[in-house]
């Protein structure tokens, strides 16, 4: 029996052929849209501006969706209004509604998509009027027949919207919706990457500009400090010199009261000179050449600083005890700076110790030599242990007289010098009991005598070395 003789069988064959053709059409459409998505992905990977992102998305998506108009709108920084990033085709009043304030009683499709962070599909003009009465004055002739409004969401927060308009009414299939949602997600991610790239570039440019400004300011400060220090030292030296001449009676006899006043002038001048030298040292530390590291015997240096500080300790009736190392230790250090650090630590210990002793010891710990300066002075509170090494910080200024005080640079300079010589300077202290500063330096070897990577020495022969660097 043929199909013409069996109408039922013929209908079944025709239906199956139709279904097969429909399935093939759906498969072909899905394949075409997948290809469009791949092209969109490839295009977005090379975009460097938000406008280029919007252009790539609209160009490919409008062909795939067979629509007549498209727009990408983004929120302003304050998220108070929307602005058009890119458009394609002729936008009707509904698609241009982002330009106007919608009435409070009828939100527009852009507001709905962005605020609810969900896609809005409007399949006919009548459905649009039903959902958005605020557009009742829009004529059907000047309007599209169907619309899609998609949020551009980043981490659940919409930063704009993607809109498509169709010439006539349209029933959006599952494939339509899936494709549109995927395109909007790709678009949002690309816009966010561009935003982050731009923000990073701006931050990098600002950081470079700030660094350059800081370098210029630091150089200007250093030049000013150097010039100021040299200029101030000249009249101070003259004051000290003329004061000594007056004390010697060159201009006539000096009575006891006058001698007392002249002594005060000399001490004040010496105090100012110490402060200037501290500032000058810091200025030069910030941009100087590497230290000259050589092999130095520790015990002879300890004996020398003991002789330099003995009178100061005796004047305060303190016992100054130096215990040399039991073995001959040689450290890799700059000779002048090594002595400078030790003198600074010992004079500080004497200054803040009213009774008892100041002891200096030296020992070996693996590959490092440790020189320890211990006193029975006022000590430092635990909260201030780290602060004593900060520039211009003075702890317990009330414990010293005005002419003994400095600007809080000595310990800061000493630690920087120690670290520049690949060592360190640390403090252990108990308030009311005493303090112990430990200077560690590497034992001299072929490696330790190599030039340090960090430049931090006082430059030039004019770098005045003042044994007493008040902290």
Image (spheres, rainbow, N blue to C red):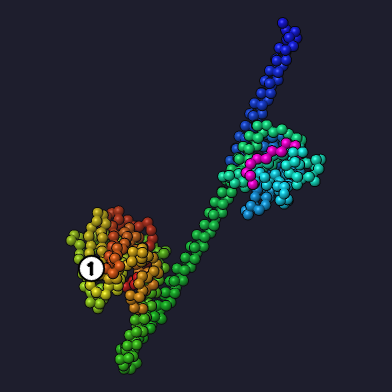
Residue at image coords 65%, 48%: 74
380 within the magenta span = no
**Residue placed farthest to the top in the image?**
1
Residue at image coords 42%, 74%: 229
Residue 369: give x, y in percent of width and height: 25, 59
Q: Is residue 31 above or below residue 470?
A: above
Please state which of residues 53 and 463 is positioned toward the viewer in this rendering.
53
Residue 24: give x, y in percent of width and height: 66, 23
Q: Quadrant of residue 9?
A: top right
Answer left or right for 164 relative to 223: right
Q: Is residue 132 above or below residue 79?
A: above
Residue at image coords 33%, 90%: 258
- Mark 1, Cα crowd under 10 Å, few <14 / some 14-19 / many 20+, is some
Q: Quadrant of residue 135?
A: top right
Q: Is residue 339 above or below residue 32?
A: below
Answer left or right for 291 relative to 115: left
Secondary-structure class at tag 1: strand
Look at the image and tell me whether residue 311 can be seen. no
121 within the magenta span = yes
Please state which of residues 392 and 466 is positioned toward the viewer in this rendering.
392
Q: Quadrant of the C terminus?
A: bottom left
Look at the image and tell me whether residue 396 can be seen. yes
The magenta segment = 115-125
- Label 1 belongs to which residue? 359
């Amino acid at each position: 029996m043929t199909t013409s003789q069996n109408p039922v069988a013929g209908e079944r064959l025709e239906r199956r052929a139709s279904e097969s053709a429909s399935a093939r059409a759906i498969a072909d459409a899905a394949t075409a849209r997948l290809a469009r998505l791949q092209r969109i992905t490839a295009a977005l990977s090379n975009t460097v501006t938000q406008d280029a992102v919007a252009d790539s998305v609209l160009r490919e998506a409008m062909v795939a969706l067979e629509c007549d108009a498209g727009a990408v709108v983004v929120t302003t920084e304050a998220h108070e209004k929307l602005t058009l990033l890119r458009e394609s085709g002729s936008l009707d009043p509904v698609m241009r509604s982002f330009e106007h304030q919608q009435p409070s009683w009828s939100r527009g499709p852009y507001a709905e998509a962005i605020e609810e962070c969900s896609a809005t599909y409007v399949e006919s003009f009548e459905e649009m009027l039903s959902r958005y009465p605020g557009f009742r004055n829009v004529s059907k002739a000047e309007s599209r027949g169907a619309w899609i409004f998609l949020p551009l969401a980043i981490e659940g927060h919409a930063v704009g919207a993607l809109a498509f308009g169709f010439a006539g009414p349209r029933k959006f299939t599952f494939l339509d919706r899936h494709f549109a949602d995927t395109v909007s997600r790709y678009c949002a991610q690309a816009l966010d990457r561009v935003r982050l790239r731009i923000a990073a570039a701006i931050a990098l440019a600002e950081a470079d500009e700030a660094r350059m400004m800081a370098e210029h300011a630091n150089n200007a400060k250093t030049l000013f400090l150097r010039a100021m220090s040299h200029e101030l030292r000249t009249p101070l030296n003259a004051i000290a010199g003329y004061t000594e001449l007056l004390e010697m009676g060159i201009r006539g006899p000096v009575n006891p009261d006058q001698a007392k006043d002249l002594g005060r002038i000399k001490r004040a001048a010496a105090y100012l000179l110490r402060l200037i030298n501290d500032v000058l040292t810091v200025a030069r530390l910030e941009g100087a050449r590497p230290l000259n590291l050589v092999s130095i015997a520790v015990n002879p240096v300890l004996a020398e600083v003991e002789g330099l500080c003995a009178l100061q300790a005796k004047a305060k009736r303190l016992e100054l005890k130096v215990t040399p190392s039991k073995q001959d230790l040689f450290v890799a250090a700059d000779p002048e700076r090594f002595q400078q650090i030790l003198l600074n630590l010992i004079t500080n210990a004497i200054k803040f110790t009213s009774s008892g002793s100041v002891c200096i010891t030296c020992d070996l710990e693996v590959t490092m030599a440790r020189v320890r300066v211990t006193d029975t002075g006022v000590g430092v509170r635990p909260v201030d242990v780290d602060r004593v090494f900060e520039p211009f910080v003075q702890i317990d200024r009330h414990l010293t007289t005005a002419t003994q005080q400095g600007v809080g640079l000595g310990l800061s300079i000493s630690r920087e010098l120690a670290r520049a010589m690949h060592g360190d300077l640390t403090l252990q202290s108990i308030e009311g009991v005493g303090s112990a500063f430990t200077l560690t330096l590497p034992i001299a070897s072929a490696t330790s005598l190599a030039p340090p990577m960090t430049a931090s020495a006082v430059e030039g022969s004019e770098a005045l070395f003042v044994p007493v660097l008040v902290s």
